[in-house]
Image: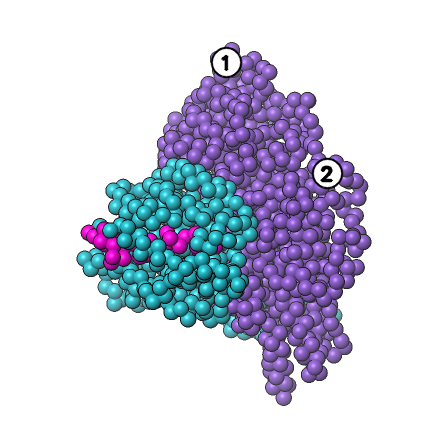
Chain colours: A purple, B cyan
Amino acid sequence: MRGVNIRNLEEFSRLIRYYILISSTEAGSGHPTSSLSATDLMCALLFGHSSSDERVSSAAGGFFRYDLDNPDYPNNDRLIFSKGHASPLFYSLWAAAGKVSPEELLTFRKFGSPLEGHPTPAFPFTEAATGSLGQGLSIGVGMALNAKYVDKLPYRTYVLLGDSEMAEGSVWEAMQIAAHYGLDNLIGILDVNRLGQRGETMYGHDVAAYEKRISSFGWKTYVIDGHSFLEILDAYEKAVGEESNAPRMIIAKTIKGKGVSFIENQDGWHGKVLSKEELQKALGELGAIDKGVRGEIKKPPPEILPPIRANEGIDFETVGTVSSAADKLFDYAKGKPVATRKAYGNALVRIFPKYPNMVVLDAEVSNSTFSETFKKAYPDRFFEMYIAEQNMVGAALGFSRRGKIPFVSTFAAFFTRAFDQIRMSQYSNANPSTALGAGIKFCGSHAGVSIGEDGASQMGLEDLAMFRTILGSAVLYPSDAVSAEKLVEGAVAYKGIVYIRTTRKDTPILYELTEAFPIGGSKVLHQSPNDAATVVAAGITLHEALAAYEELKKEGIMVRVIDLYSVKPIDVETLQKAARETRTIITVEDHFAEGGIGEAVTSALAGSRIVVHSLAVRKMPKSGKPEELLDYEEISREAIVQRLKNIRKDEFVRVG
Amino acid sequence: MRGVNIRNLEEFSRLIRYYILISSTEAGSGHPTSSLSATDLMCALLFGHSSSDERVSSAAGGFFRYDLDNPDYPNNDRLIFSKGHASPLFYSLWAAAGKVSPEELLTFRKFGSPLEGHPTPAFPFTEAATGSLGQGLSIGVGMALNAKYVDKLPYRTYVLLGDSEMAEGSVWEAMQIAAHYGLDNLIGILDVNRLGQRGETMYGHDVAAYEKRISSFGWKTYVIDGHSFLEILDAYEKAVGEESNAPRMIIAKTIKGKGVSFIENQDGWHGKVLSKEELQKALGELGAIDKGVRGEIKKPPPEILPPIRANEGIDFETVGTVSSAADKLFDYAKGKPVATRKAYGNALVRIFPKYPNMVVLDAEVSNSTFSETFKKAYPDRFFEMYIAEQNMVGAALGFSRRGKIPFVSTFAAFFTRAFDQIRMSQYSNANPSTALGAGIKFCGSHAGVSIGEDGASQMGLEDLAMFRTILGSAVLYPSDAVSAEKLVEGAVAYKGIVYIRTTRKDTPILYELTEAFPIGGSKVLHQSPNDAATVVAAGITLHEALAAYEELKKEGIMVRVIDLYSVKPIDVETLQKAARETRTIITVEDHFAEGGIGEAVTSALAGSRIVVHSLAVRKMPKSGKPEELLDYEEISREAIVQRLKNIRKDEFVRVG
């Protein structure tokens, strides 16, 4: 009976190879050889239980279980192509399952087609956008954590990995964490086809080298011939059946270009498609193909339970309608010094009952970011991700794609470590399946030179620039604990990626609890009919601006002071009004000059013929007291006063 | 005799512990407990050979060899504190060697002191700035590669690692590459003190867990008690003596806070200093300390050869005086389509004889970035770093700090992977030891949506924003092969970090070979007395701007066209002149709207009351033909023409 099944699979895999070849040649670009090496592995995963295979469709269940008509079904198994360039295979699998027509397959890589060059959620069976290598296993970790610890669902997460991407450290971050959390529901499939883009990988076909490393990281490993259905099916059976807390990795020796003799195991065929002539030759080699047959994918068995919410008592009706002002958890007296990072932690605890889909992740600094406040209150929804920011962000994306709202925190500076994962997460259009919000919510603490003595390595000075580049992102920078609380609440409801920048130091409370902080707004803290200029600041420098205001007032000089708590989207209207009325704008930020508040404001005023003076970090930062560093970088109260006086002198000279 | 030595070391380590405690308490912040765990390991490394120790100072040589009076001496061993927060230990070691006075030690973390919170090259014995965890081993890889393959020097590179940072994937990237290149001159020392910042690490005191993983990656491992000088000295002796091609890792079980009973192995003592009272108690525990004694560090033995240059035939006199125009390697006819990425590879080959300190690194895409052109010409100076961008940048920093000029290439998008390493490299003030240049030279290919069918994951759309944030960086964006060649040459001579953005597509040659492209300049390609606006572009969009010019000209509308090949530093003067004369500026860039050309130009004109219209990537990018995507994102010739017409209509309406 096994023989029958395998013969069927062998036949069926030819159809998939056919699809790979015709779609990539039609596109004129793409990665057919990287697809062909993994074809048998994936064919067996999805269709290995096909109804003619009595053995595999027995009580043991099929391998990949998925309701084809309902990609959002919570109990579906998940399949992530970490080697996203094998997209021809990915789309061909779903074509073989009858969900993509042969005509649609020929739109591969064409403008407007959901079949993009690398998979994105424009295609409904894509779990998350991939294509930047080494990220898929982290996404899988997030989905597997969700299944095991949050939704408590029996779905399995499969991740197809390439051998080249095993050089990426993020893969090993995911390996460590997956074993640490005992993710027995996570199954990696490593396609060792020996060849990278420009030649052989570090280990070539030495599958033992991978086996040694991966098993040393606490994974169950299965080394197989990736073109023997016998071995492949055996490996899946063991991988899904084995009693162990360990995540599992099938390490398969494969041939790049398998099935087309003249490109098999050849250098120079990465990311290259067959010409029309070569295609004919290749199809001749494939032989007769039954183009009418479609594979069947097993549905998740009905006895599997629907997702269990951690907070079953919560009234979902009230979600999104929180009246923060009335919330009793607030306890911030005006003037009281409270760090915004502390308010971040408080806010997470306060809003969780209203947003039960929240999960909180931190990279081993929860006692600095104050996400530990949440951890103490809701330990089941907190995930310690250790000092591995890339995997943390990838895992957050996995959570997000399973309907959770992840809050992710570390020092602002260390999010630079995960910029590629942050960038990629925007292409996953995260969280379309929930009305509660969309996109990962990032919180970076210890922003700017004002952290003081720890020195430059710990100072987030490029975080605003980084997060501003993300499409549709909100970049928020509270100056006091009240606005921090309100902005965390704004973040959870915002449909997109959010970055919240918090400050290490205590800063005095500026606002009443009744104050609202809509994303995209700003606060005018001082204004008069005689304002000589407007000072725009946020976070730590807002307090410098307020001090400068007092100092200038003593000398009879009035300035407008704006709290730009929403750096993106930016309150163009208020800024333009201030520009019209005061004619001079000074921005002050504890961030490098490029891409931060100065440029955001300058851009917002780009049409209004107004002078913007940007005070920002422009000298090599160093250790010292916060006040010394603010002075040194010329972003302190004194620097603001001085700059304003210089501007007035210049104008006087010009007018004179 | 060993006993004598060990007793001396035990005594001497008390002096170091004394320094750690007094300097951190005086500073009021810092990481004494993380320093105390590694004290014995470092004390033995630097002073283990002390003259009373006949055994170790025998023919086998001492462990750490360093000319204290000449930190730049090429044969010095290198010591990198990857766990940079153990800076109190780092400075105390050099104090114990007599190179930092006790008074200076008390300036630790104070404004203006070279003894910063985390080590930077402000302190002459710092090899590279650390403090963002998980980066030191990569820097060590660069220094060890340099010793083994470039300078062919026998110096050894030692890297002190913390156990927390082993969660960072970049460490495992470095592990793989170090073994791959047989870096037997690289010795890691892993301080397994069990405790991270907020609690226990993933493996706690399970040193076997580290041993299993590290040895599986092809390293020689030595598991020891990190407080037994007997075991420590034995381990160093084996690590330096063993005949093997493998890099070596000493895995030491240690106690955080070792030596001060009431903080030993305690949670809650990370990054926390003793109060004055606690300090007195701790010093009481340390007992009598001979504050007058100083340790001796062995000099590199005289028979060690000075650095060997790979290009001994090169006339060093001519370095930096290249006349590119006269160079015969140029072969670019005007109008000929040549990709700028191709010119990048050509330029590397052309200039190498003049800049023999160059090394070239690539992350497994050399056939796309065209660094393979260099690899073919000078294989000994090319280092394949596989798909591990973080380690590549860290290693480049290591090379740079050993006097090399590293050129580092991958897809523009994938440099986001290494933003933390890029950011940190600016704090190492790279390459002060050579007059040839300073800082890593980065080249990102495949920038923008114009790469086409591969889709968003492969498109560099935030690279300009990222590299613009780097202090003192140059951000260059050539539009044709001639300017690309010239800008590579400009990059090598530039004293700082440089980013060169290249384009996938062939673009026609615009410039004569005689044209010069100074960094900070720009080119006015079209101008007239009647220009209705100025279009500022670079790279692929410059060609769109030129096409728009022709189209508008047909309609009798003249526009100025500026090639902004130097995005940073920016040619303020030319932009201001254009702004004054044409009153309207349109920027066009194949990059997200934030932090790129639009904001750079807007900032440059911030004082001049001029309207800047920014055309940039503002919609979710996708797969398609380059032209389709330029149109879709409204950065094509048609978009420029349309925008200009709209502006004129608006102005007409306003005037009307």
Whether B40 is among the magenta residues is yes
Residue nearest the observer in this picture, A296 or A169: A169
SS of the residue at dot 1?
helix
Q: Position of residue B435 (x, y in %)?
A: 33, 67
Q: Helix, strand or loop at disc 2?
A: loop
Q: Earlier in the sequence, mark 2 or mark 1?
A: 1
How far apart are the two marked residues, 2 and 1, measured between alpha carbons?
Answer: 46 Å
* Residue occupying the point 41% across, 71% down: B103
Going 54% across and 14% down the picture, which residue do you hit?
A: A55
Give the number of the disc on residue A2. Answer: 1
Residue type highlighted by circle 1:
Arg
Span shown in magenta = B33-59
Label 2 sits on residue: A311
Between A521 and A221, the one lying in front of the other is: A221
A397 shown above or below A337: above
Callout 2, which amino acid? Asn
